[in-house]
Amino acid sequence: LLKYRTDGNQSIEPEYFAPIIPMVLVNGANGIGTGFKTKIPKQNPREIIENLKRMLNGEKPNPMDPWFKGYRGTVERIDQFNFVISGELAVLSPTTIEITELPVDVPTENYKKSVLEKLLCGSEECPPIITDYQEHHTDNNVRFVVTMTEKMMQQVESEGFHRAFKLQSVYSLRSMLLYDSNGSLKTYNSVDDIMNEFYEVRLELYRKRRDYFSGKVEALRARLVNQNNFLTEISSKVLIVDSEKKFDVLLEELRRRNYAPDPLIAWEK
């Protein structure tokens, strides 16, 4: 079903693989090539499967938003191409807040140095905002406990906690470039476009596989019919096969009696 490439005289991997579901949407993609870049958001595999089932039933797929396993923050759509991804923050007291989730793809150590340290030490343009912070992370979860004065807490609250602590990032869908089934670089305007193209390619491969097995079963059936007729005619003495009869003579006789050459071998050719 797949078109395998060759390296010299050796067969290597096919031009592309065709998994059951579009794995590029499960794993996502992010990279830079010569003259272009690509960024494909991860999607919930359960939503992908549900939408493929809807498409098989002739229904329109439901909208899908970027999904990150185990992420406790929020993902909100701004428009067709942009999403806002927000970390998680809670107010513990009039002078203390707790940060328990960062924006996607922001390492904990980088956030501490680029955000909290600057808020703690201040700069010429901006005075210090916080008075201290403590780290209580685990292997799987981030947790900063940040303290500040009540006056500064009110100021930060009026500005917006997520904005002040840089706990929001914008995720854009304007750079979704992939090689299509023809091997050409193509820009996709939405996740639905990727889903639709995958659906058509995979469905056609299902048809080819169905036709392949149907043809093979039919060839096997024809072979069994030949074998059954051959044994029946021998047992009823209609066809005489003995050691004295030459092979060419027997072969010509089988042709006259409408015995086809091995259907399975003919089908495989």
Image (tube, rainbow, N blue to C red):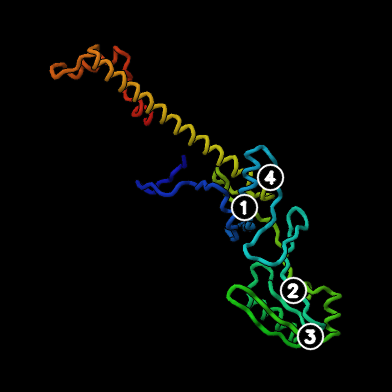
Residue 31 placement (x, y as % from top left)? 59, 61
Q: Callout 1: few (<14), some (14-19), or many (20+) C-alpha neighbours within 10 Å?
A: few
| Mark closer to the chain start, 3 or 1 | 1
Give me the C-alpha separation between circle 4 and circle 3. Answer: 47 Å
Disc 3 is placed on an element classified as: loop
| Mark closer to the chain start, 4 or 3 | 4
Residue 196 placement (x, y as % from top left)? 64, 43
Q: Callout 3: few (<14), some (14-19), or many (20+) C-alpha neighbours within 10 Å?
A: many
Location of the C terminus (image quadrant)? top left
Q: Can residue 252 be seen in the rendering of this structure?
A: no
Residue 262 placement (x, y as % from top left)? 32, 25
Q: Which residue is mark 2?
A: 89
Seen from the viewer's position, the closer of residues 249 and 142 is 142
Q: Which callout, 3 or 1, points to the residue nearer the camera?
A: 1
Q: Are marks 3 and 2 in contact (CB under 8 Å)?
A: no
Residue 39 placement (x, y as % from top left)? 63, 58
Judged left or right of residue 81, residue 22 is: left
Q: Which mark is residue 148?
A: 3
Q: Residue furthest front?
A: 236
Q: Are marks 4 and 2 in contact (CB under 8 Å)?
A: no
Residue 99, placed above or below residue 169: below
Q: Which residue is mark 1?
A: 46
